[in-house]
Amino acid sequence: MNSSVRLWLCWAGLMVLSLGTVWSGAAGVVVLLAMVKGWVIVDGFMELRHGPWKWRVAMLGWGLVVLAGIVGLSA
């Protein structure tokens, strides 16, 4: 699959995930979909899927840091 098609599929996936976020409205689902969207952005648009593993871990780990902060502040 060429990169143009992959980017279009990532974009379409992000649109579906965004609509799911709006339609669900449940806090847990919104946070979960935001994490999935972050993963699609890191692997799809930023193309870190084949990049240095430290960068990929840092980018994907940031979502977990934010999630931990949200859970910590709401507890």
Image (cartoon, rainbow, N blue to C red):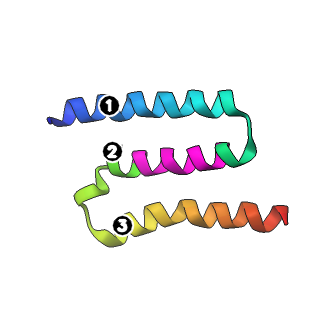
Write the residue at 22% across / 59% down.
50
Mark 1–mark 2 CB contact (< 8 Å): yes
* Label number found at residue 22: none
* Label number found at residue 55: 3
Q: Is residue 35 rendered magenta in the image?
A: yes
Q: Amino acid at mark 3?
A: Trp
* Occupied quadrant, residue 23: top right
Give SS at disc 1. Answer: helix
Q: Amino acid at mark 2?
A: Gly
Mark whose residue sits in front, 1 or 2: 1
| Crowd rating for badge 1 (residues with CA inside 10 Å; few <14, some 14–19, many 20+) | few
Give SS at disc 3. Answer: helix
Write the residue at 73% across / 34% down.
25
The image shows residue 46, relative to residue 65, as above or below, that is: above
* Label number found at residue 44: 2
38 relative to 73 in the view: left or right: left
Looking at the picture, how far across and down is residue 40, in whole percent? 41, 45
The image shows residue 29, relative to residue 14, as above or below, that is: below
| Crowd rating for badge 2 (residues with CA inside 10 Å; few <14, some 14–19, many 20+) | some
Q: Amino acid at mark 1?
A: Leu
Mark whose residue sits in front, 2 or 3: 2
Looking at the picture, how far across and down is residue 7, in whole percent? 29, 34
